[in-house]
Amino acid sequence: MTQYEVPTLAHVAKLAGVSENTVSRVIRNKGPIAEDTRNRVVKAIETLGYVPNRAAGSLASSGSLLIGVLLPSLSNVVFPEVLQGIHAALATTAYQPMVGVTNYDAGKEQDILSSLLAWQPAAIVTTGFDHTEATRRMLSNSRVRVAELMDIDAEPIDVAVGLSHRQAGYATGRHLIERGYRRIGYVGHDWGADRRARLRHDGVCQALSETGLTLRAEERFDGPSSTMAGRDTLATLLARAPDIDAVVFSNDDMAVGGFFHCLAAGIVVRKQLALFGFNGLDIGQALPMPLSTVRSNRFLIGKTAVERLLESPTRPEQRVVIDTGFDIIEGATA
Amino acid sequence: MTQYEVPTLAHVAKLAGVSENTVSRVIRNKGPIAEDTRNRVVKAIETLGYVPNRAAGSLASSGSLLIGVLLPSLSNVVFPEVLQGIHAALATTAYQPMVGVTNYDAGKEQDILSSLLAWQPAAIVTTGFDHTEATRRMLSNSRVRVAELMDIDAEPIDVAVGLSHRQAGYATGRHLIERGYRRIGYVGHDWGADRRARLRHDGVCQALSETGLTLRAEERFDGPSSTMAGRDTLATLLARAPDIDAVVFSNDDMAVGGFFHCLAAGIVVRKQLALFGFNGLDIGQALPMPLSTVRSNRFLIGKTAVERLLESPTRPEQRVVIDTGFDIIEGATA
DNA sequence: GCGGAATATGTTAGCGCTGAGATAACGAAG
DNA sequence: CTTCGTTATCTCAGCGCTAACATATTCCGC
């Protein structure tokens, strides 16, 4: 609890017998420094336990080593994974992420964005394309680079990194059709909040309709996705449409819940009812029968976005779209 | 991409026809302001789209509305949930969290801590009690309040918020003993990184030894916990000790994996082999048989810690320990 | 109608750092 | 030796804001 005076550049400078600016240059590895001077300065920093004040640095240089990150939620595993990717890309740099959680609310996103911008971040990483007009304006008018993650089915502000959810849905539909399933149902969650789930759904429908099929039945849980929701919603769907032979779930959480329902209800998975998810989560692959699903590369999305943003110190001349792709995981449930 | 001059306090002041200081006071709701003046200032802020520069504010007031957060990992669901609690508590305030991920490495924690401190945060939230000497020194010497989360089995720097993992383990042991299980095994993960898993393990052993029992067999996966690890490690354990009647897992992820192993291997859960987890994750409760486990209140831990930290602007006189408790979830697997 | 609260606003000096330019010290080249 | 280019360092203003204090202005009670 000792209240000691926090050392500043001035203290270090005095102790090392150089000017403040020299210390500053040593710290930032900028400009030529004599080996001898550098050593003296480094030693002084260590003896004083000096830690630079970023607020001052940021003010003086009108810039910061901060990356603002806006995520819709932390309860969906997917976003912590993206965040991991971001942290991984940042780990070797001096940048720090600053995370805000929007709860899928564009208005809240706008508020959080302006408090993030108040720290003069070097870049902003956000999710999807659903922004308020004001958000879009703030971003376009500012000097910060912007990455929009997860989705590449629309025009980005600067950089989009993700996959085409429409295509992923389409591939899902094709997969099921090729394996002979014809009476296909859909179990989803609230897509007011989740535009991407809807795109996948639409992709599935498109694949079906190209083969002259439509979704046999469809049930959506009114709330966020969860294992429990998947379990219950599949039960509801089957009550209404007992004759379906395959179900596409809005994601793996829901699909795993569906698998549990089948276990509990004595339905033989695949033989009686095929299950298909989205994301390729570990849990789905650890099931007694690995889940058939689509791998979205969340970690890679976060990592790639940050790497791309740090590549250049200015906003890109042209809009950049990076497709991190997806893979069908065959699994054993469809 | 318009490069317009970013408005500052001075611009707002000029437009509203008041001094900069008055604008500053309006923004911070500090000191008496005439209703009329306030309106003019607010209007000026809006027309200019002024966003205060926090770096400048922070420098001038030598403090910030930042909370530094140090988490060991984001891959374990537990920590995103803690983070959610932190965000929830912060949502109604002007504070922003700034998150660092240490990968269970005390040295890395130290590095990240010093870059967090460079932003003059109001408080630091960290995990557990495993810190380097330097970390401890930095924290005790600084003016920031510190909360150490998850664990209350040691002496905190300022505030500890969490549960007694030893007691949770003990309760687990008692639960199994009371239900007649006598040949108890343990499936764990790498506890070099996870001190708390070890405390729970020790608690279980203590309960057993009080009844004259010991762990019949014990197997630890050398790596982080995961569903797959739980599945495989239970298989290994059973190969070595087929006669056990119950298994305690280091956490729910592992236990769910164990459940899957039983499914695949045709072992009747509870009747032939009881399973017990830790954490009370949703996934465990969505299983066809809800998992018997201990609910740790991760969200509450994060939320409580931040609330407690924001209660007072200074470090507490005395060390504070807040027990967020735990509950045994009966479930159906033990 | 005057002293003294209470209320509302202005003035001023930094906070700790960085950027731009000035200065010094030293060889190499003419 | 002077001139010039390098290399290494210093000087100093100022980033945008806030704390502390100074200065009006208003409204009381007596």
Image: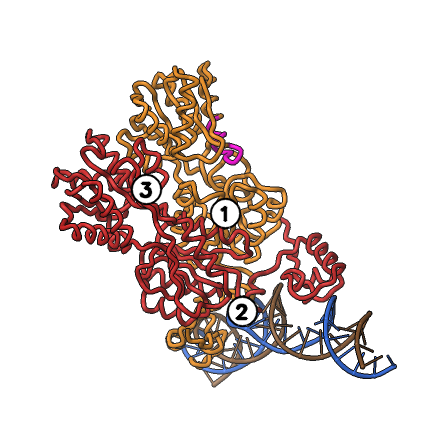
Chain colours: A red, B orange, C brown, D blue
Quick one: B304 or A239, which is closer to the camera?
A: A239
Q: Looking at the rendering, which quadrant does residue A251 occupy? A: top left
Per the picture, the main secondary structure of the magenta-coloured stretch is helix
User: How crowded is the residue under tag 1: few (<14 C-alpha within 10 Å), some, or many (20+)?
Assistant: some
The kind of residue tagged 2 is Ser
Q: Residues within 10 Å of mark 2 (few under 14, many from 20)?
A: some
Q: Which stretch appears magenta? A: B191-201
Q: Which mark is residue B101?
A: 1
Residue A272: x %, y % from top left: 18, 33
**Front in this rendered view, residue A247 or B14:** A247
Q: Is residue A182 left or right of residue A38?
A: left
Quadrant placement of the C terminus of chain A = top left
Query: Which numbered circle lies on residue A62?
Result: 2
To the question of a shared chain for discs 2 and 1, the answer is no
Residue B188 as seen in the image, left or right of residue A15:
left
SS label for mark 2: loop
Residue depicted at x 50% and y 35%: B194
Give the Cα separation between the discs numbered 2 and 3: 47 Å
Chain for disc number 2: A
Residue A158 in the image: x percent, y percent?
40, 65
Amino acid residing under circle 1: Val
- Check the image and report above or below for B304 versus B268: below
First in sequence: mark 2 or mark 3? 2
Residue A15 appears in view: no
Q: Which residue is mark 3?
A: A329
Residue B236 to residue A90: above or below = above
Q: Amino acid at mark 3?
A: Ile
